[in-house]
Image: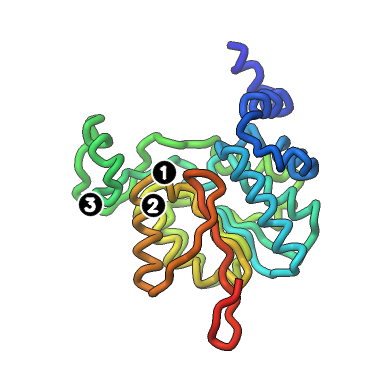
Amino acid sequence: MIVNLIKRSLALHSTYKLVRDFRTVPSSRWSHLAALQDIFKVLPKTMLPMPRLFDLHEAVTTVNAEGIAGAFVECGVWNGGAVGLMGLADRRCPGPERVIHLFDSFEGLPQPTEKDTDVYQGYLDEGHPEESSDALRAIGACRGEGAVTVQTFLTNHVGIPRDQLAFHVGWFQDTVPTAATALGPIAILRLDGDWYESTKVCIENLYDLVVEGGFLVIDDYGTFTGCREAIDAFFKERGEAPDFIHSDDMCVYLRKPRVTYGKSIN
């Protein structure tokens, strides 16, 4: 009852989550008051742990400070907290003009496949049938508040101009390949699709759009086998061995290497 009352107020909800997650904030981060203020504002709308939020905020301020052009792209938006944080960091440390692209079904996750070995059998055990077609359908997991509510939060509460937001509503397999042809360069690409197929279609269509010095963030790399295998297979096929940095045990990120005279430099 008390928690439900708290959730009705964004400020109270943020305070509740900040107190709850106090111990997960690295001691070195408490001096980053600007980042903490921005994180506080979006806490009710994200499931991301504090270390990931600090790293995402820092990624935005880094590309802005270095003048790295390109869009911010998130695949897996839920209630818009991470996008809101990117918008706040972008305003706090201005850089090149950007569009923020939001890819999400806004219906929750689709069904996993056999590639998602750690969840697929449990999915079947819950009474779901094995899929006999490629048609995607929502299974009720991770369903957020919907695109309209997310847009209202981002424009009214966070203050991101509506023309800076580009919503791509639908399954990644339907929206990402089409949008990628006109998306242009990407400064930050954040993948939060959980499953193998959802991650695969995003990394294959969007990674080459990430500019040198831009960031790739993979939220579920250490959480779900399918996500990790999709990423590992993608880079193995290209003959690359990315040096991932860990935000925590589950989330990893990298900066796309800068290439000079055929050699990569970080």
Could you tell me which secondary element the residue under label 3 belongs to? Answer: loop
In the picture provided, is 203 more to the left or to the right than 55?
A: left
Point out the frontmost of discs 3 and 2.
2
Q: CA distance from mark 3 to mark 2?
A: 21 Å
In the picture provided, is 12 more to the left or to the right than 94?
A: left
Q: CA distance from mark 1 to mark 2?
A: 8 Å
Residue at image position (64%, 16%) is 5
Q: Amino acid at mark 2?
A: Cys
To which residue does mark 1 refer?
Answer: 223
Q: Quadrant of residue 16?
A: top right
Q: Amino acid at mark 3?
A: Ser
Point out the frontmost of discs 1 and 3.
1
Could you tell me which secondary element the residue under label 1 belongs to? Answer: loop
Q: Observer-nearest residue: 182 or 265?
A: 265
Residue at image position (38%, 74%) is 239
Q: Earlier in the sequence, mark 3 or mark 2?
A: 3
Whether the residues at callouts 1 and 3 have beta carbons within 8 Å, the answer is no
To which residue does mark 2 refer?
Answer: 227
Whether the residues at callouts 1 and 2 have beta carbons within 8 Å, the answer is yes
- Circle 3 packing at 10 Å, graded few (<14), some (14-19), many (20+), is few
